[in-house]
Amino acid sequence: MFAARYVPGEKKLSLTDIPKPRPGPRDVLLKIRAAGICHSDLHVLAGEVPYPHTFTMGHEACGEVVEKGNEVSADIKVGGLYAVHGPNPCGDCTYCRTGHDNLCNGPGRTFVGLGQDGAYADYLVVPARNVVEVPKGVSPEVAAVATDAVLTPYHAIKTLGEVQTNSKVLVIGLGGLGINGVQVAVALGAKVTATDLRESSLELAKKFGANETVNSKEIDKKIKPASFDVVIDFVGRDSTFTQAQTFVRPGGTIVLVGLGSSHVPVISTPLISYQVRVQGAFWGTHQEMHEIFQLIDEGKIKPQVETAPMKDVNHWLEELEAGRVKSRMALLPSQM
Ligand code: NAD
Ligand code: ZN
Ligand code: ZN
């Protein structure tokens, strides 16, 4: 089968032919229907998140179950469309058993498409416990990108940011994650200001209900310091994390999602004297997967997605790097 594989030290994925995987007793074999491209793939290819071995990339996966192991429950149907919970939790550890399965530290656990084989391929094997059925009206490409580009902002904004009706929220960085972050915050009833360097992103944010949009280059002129209950940084660079600290109110929360830089500056005196909370955010839980699919099914979140053939994955990774992807790309295998 076709697979686009990460090779340590290489800047592009290697497009290869590898054997079709076989499911174990508790696994499902998915025929991939769509796979989203995340900016984290670029951090891996740039060597910022190094892996010592080769694997098939792609951690936003949706596919049809074509085979299942003999211990898989009858609830999971051959022929059904399923989305993959990419953190791939073990189901047994303390984190998994207490509803924090995104933090799973079970033995040998790795993320789908990040350290172990993922979705830039014709087929993918995953444990059956880590798939969620896609509601009938939701397309494979929307379901694929939702597993990260909606799940991660949902976890960051609702669960960790504790955003609620009338919260004042600043969303920094309106790419694949951030544009859905705007929609999550709007769906929660927040008053949303959205900022990015790209005018096209500001237009999209307006379309999805942001009350105010500001180009990042002008943010210091246009926005009053200390005016947001919650700031979500989907970029994670020096400049954006500094902005987050400037614009969060005393006692407010900064949620850091973007991996733009390995270190970000903390300006300690205001952080301490204004009791600002800084919260890291990682992906999302299995339970939240169900919640986001319900919101998508009800039309409260409309994930933006563009599609392209999977064989062009390297081209679209370059386009994402160059800032020319307006929302989120989902790749479609050629053998559909
Ligand atoms: P993306 O490339 O789709 O979007 C990035 C957006 O940030 C673009 O709109 C870009 O114009 C904007 N931007 C870049 N520099 C900016 C600046 N200085 N000020 C304002 N806006 C700026 O990326 P994405 O896929 O949405 O991912 C965003 C980040 O989140 C990446 O670093 C990615 O690795 C990370 N990520 C983290 C998690 C997690 O669990 N914490 C999950 C997925 C992705
Ligand atoms: Zn991702
Ligand atoms: Zn676990």
Image (spheres, helix red, strand yellow):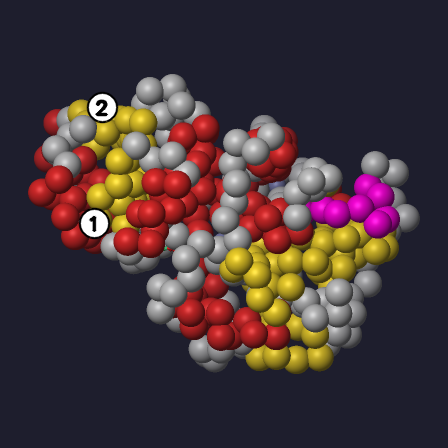
Q: How far across and how far down the image is residue 172, in percent?
A: 29, 44
3D distance between C-alphas at marks 1 and 2: 24 Å
Asked whether 123 falls inside the magenta stretch, the response is no
Which portion, as a residue range, is magenta? 76-84
Image quarter for ligand 3: top right
Residue pictured at 57% horizontal, 79% vertical:
14
For this orientation, the residue located farthest to the top is: 165
Placement of the N terminus among the 4 image quadrants = bottom right
Which is in the foreground here, disc 1 or disc 2? 1
Asked whether 80 falls inside the magenta stretch, the response is yes
Residue type at tag 2:
Gly
Residue pictured at 19% horizontal, 38% vertical:
245
| Quarter location, residue 111 | bottom right
Q: How far across and how far down the image is residue 32, in percent?
A: 71, 60
Placement of the C terminus among the 4 image quadrants = bottom right
Residue pictured at 41% horizontal, 45% vertical:
179
- In the image, the residue with mark 1 has its CB under 8 Å from the nearest atom of ligand 1: yes
Residue type at tag 1:
Ser
Q: How far across and how far down the image is residue 331, in percent?
A: 60, 63
Tag shown at residue 216: 1
Q: Is residue 114 above or below residue 163?
A: below
Query: In this view of the protein, can residue 81 be seen by the observer?
Result: yes
Residue assigned mark 2: 251
Query: In this view of the protein, can residue 86 be seen by the observer?
Result: no
Q: In this view, does 129 lie to the left or right of 52?
A: right
Q: Is residue 7 above or below residue 303?
A: below
Q: Is residue 188 above or below residue 114?
A: above
Report if the CB atoms under discs 1 and 2 are less than 8 Å apart. Answer: no
SS for tag 1?
helix
| Near-viewer residue (120 or 90) | 120
> How many neighbours does mark 1 have within 10 angstroms: few (below 14), some (14-19), or many (20 or more)?
many
> How many neighbours does mark 2 have within 10 angstroms: few (below 14), some (14-19), or many (20 or more)?
some
